[in-house]
Image (cartoon, helix red, strand yellow):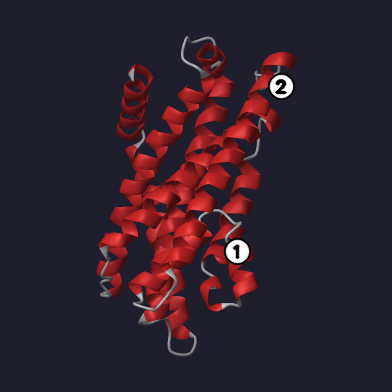
Amino acid sequence: MTSFKAEIWRQIWLYRKYSFNYLSDFVLLIMMFMAIFFGGALVGGGVLGTSLNALVIGYILWTLIQNTISQMGMSVTNQMQNGILEQQFLMPVSTRRLFFNKSLVNIIVSTVQAILALLIIMMFTDHWIEFSAILVIPFVLALVATTGLGYIIVSLVLYFKRIGSTLVIFQYVYLGILLTNFEHFSFGIKCLSCLLPIFPMVSWMRLSVNQHTYSLGFYLGASLFNAVLWLTIGLAMFEITNRNVRKNGSLALY
């Protein structure tokens, strides 16, 4: 609990110290959505109604992943450069719990940013989406899957040291994939899309806000499977990487 509180205060201090930088990143996210929105308006009628609902849901959940992944990657890389990461590995707290706390705090911060971005986007587009209580389930499961992605990013940073360019490419390629409505494809394609991180949760939320009929059992089962799958992959990758890094003494950046 002490390490969790320390991580929260560290995040608060960073936001106070570098508030202009964080505010600029947030404004950029809003501007990117508005560019997509007005770009669609210029090409044949634009995105309205159910397609706008799908666009908003996909984009907001992408911001959740993007913020969590970029924060985890940059945080671990900076701590590795400063030698802080080596000190943290000597702490009495297990490294799994240490990075779980980091991932949890990043997810909390990213969730707050995503909610703020959602409110601002709905205000700018004058399109207010009605959310039902059942959407809490796919959203929470999306956070579980995102935790697994956080462990994967930490593992990649510990092993490869520098993955900044890879993260950028992944984030924007994944944005295009995440905005694809796989729920309207064939059953086989829908099943395959459930293997991608948080895809069944996104499809479930899009179908719900658009008030389309859907199989609750299928999307609940697919979302649970997806969350457990990516959390398990993340934990397994972290355990293997953590063991190899300690064994080879390759924790330092250089």
Q: Is residue 17 visible?
A: yes
Q: Nearer the viewer, mark 1 or mark 2?
A: 1
Location of residue 184 in the rendering, given as x and y in whole percent from the top left corner = 53, 78
Q: Which mark is residue 193?
A: 1
**Residue at label 2?**
244
Pick whichever of labels 1 and 2 is earlier in the sequence: 1
Q: Amino acid at mark 1?
A: Ser
Indicate whether 124 appears above or below 14. below
Question: In the image, what residue occupies the spot 45% across and 84% down?
Answer: 42
Of residues 124 and 207, which is closer to you in this image?
207
Residue sitting at x 56%, y 45%: 230
**In the rendered view of the protein, which quadrant contains the C terminus?**
top right
Quadrant (top left, top right, bottom left, bottom right) of the N terminus? top left
Q: With 151 as the anchor, is 134 left or right in this view?
A: left
Determine which quarter of the picture holds residue 246.
top right
Front in this rendered view, residue 112 or 253: 112
Q: Position of residue 53 (x, y in %)?
A: 37, 73
Query: Furthest residue to the front?
Result: 217
Name which quarter of the figure residue 165 lies in. top right
The quarter of the displayed image where residue 241 is located:
top right
Query: What is the CA distance from the residue labelled 1 to the residue labelled 2?
Result: 32 Å
Q: Is residue 72 above or below residue 176?
A: above
Say which element carries label 1: helix
The number of numbered badges drawn on the structure is 2
Considering the numbered disc 2 on the image, is that residue within a helix, a strand or a loop? helix
Three-letter residue code for mark 2: Asn
Q: Residues within 10 Å of mark 1 (few under 14, many from 20)?
A: many
Residue drawn at 57 percent across, 65 percent down: 176
